[in-house]
Amino acid sequence: MDFLQDAKRALTRRRPEAGLDAYLATLIVGMRRAARADVASLFLLDEVTGCYILRAQDGWAAPNWVGAARYNPHQGWAGSMALEDWPRVFDDLNNYKRRTNRTTYGTYGKQIWGDRVPETVADPGVDGELSTGTGEQAAHEDKLRVRALSLPLRGGSGKFGVLTLLIGNEQA
């Protein structure tokens, strides 16, 4: 119940008149703190491109990816979770991704976790382009156990985004 009360405070602390970007930034910081998560990401559907674009984040190792990180529908974690009908909770996200043949840390793993992920995780983009990258990595022993909560967002016009909260715990 504390989480819901903290989330309500985060939503009402700043009004949208102060600017949508500032409002989303305040919201995501409040949501991350309320959930006691390490990382919070908010991807929203861009109707022009049809991509889910990172509109707010808190806890990313490389915070300058707001507005740049993007996924097509069904692509990557955010692009897939945005289309889900229900929230998804994963006690061990990396294990789930390995079992379903997905890249363990994903396209933006290095930007999210920084030095907490292996050097073998590729950076997105080639020659400065903000593409989705390959996200390929060599087989290794994961030292970071990631727990995740993904909440697909809906409105009158349908599914419009996803809020993801991540907790990363170092393993021995």
Image (tube, helix red, strand yellow):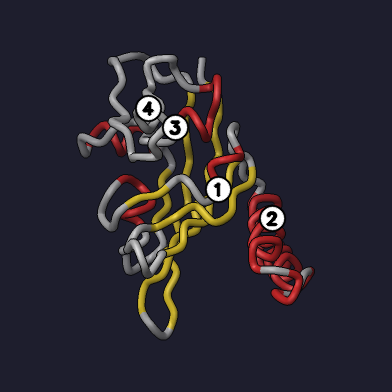
Q: Position of residue 152 (x, y in %)?
A: 41, 64
Amino acid found under the numbered disc labelled 4: Asp
Q: CA distance from mark 4 to mark 2?
A: 38 Å
Q: Earlier in the sequence, mark 1 or mark 3?
A: 1
Left or right, 164 with reference to 136:
right
Q: CA distance from mark 1 to mark 3?
A: 14 Å
Residue annotated with mark 2: 34
> Label 3 crowding class (10 Å Cα cut-off): few <14, some 14-19, many 20+?
many
Q: Are marks 4 and 2 in contact (CB under 8 Å)?
A: no
Residue found 45% across the figure and 69% down from its top = 153
Left or right, 102 with reference to 141:
left
Amino acid found under the numbered disc labelled 2: Ala
Residue found 48% across the figure and 46% down from its top = 68
Q: Are marks 3 and 2 in contact (CB under 8 Å)?
A: no
Residue annotated with mark 3: 109
Q: Earlier in the sequence, mark 4 or mark 2?
A: 2
Q: CA distance from mark 4 to mark 1?
A: 19 Å
Residue annotated with mark 4: 127
Circle 3 — which element? helix
> Label 4 crowding class (10 Å Cα cut-off): few <14, some 14-19, many 20+?
few
Nearest to the eye among marks 1 and 3: give it.
1
Residue found 55% across the figure and 29% down from its top = 169
Q: Residue furthest right?
A: 13
Q: Earlier in the sequence, mark 2 or mark 1?
A: 2
Q: CA distance from mark 4 to mark 3?
A: 19 Å
Nearest to the eye among marks 4 and 3: give it.
4
Residue annotated with mark 1: 66
Residue 66 shows in this picture: yes
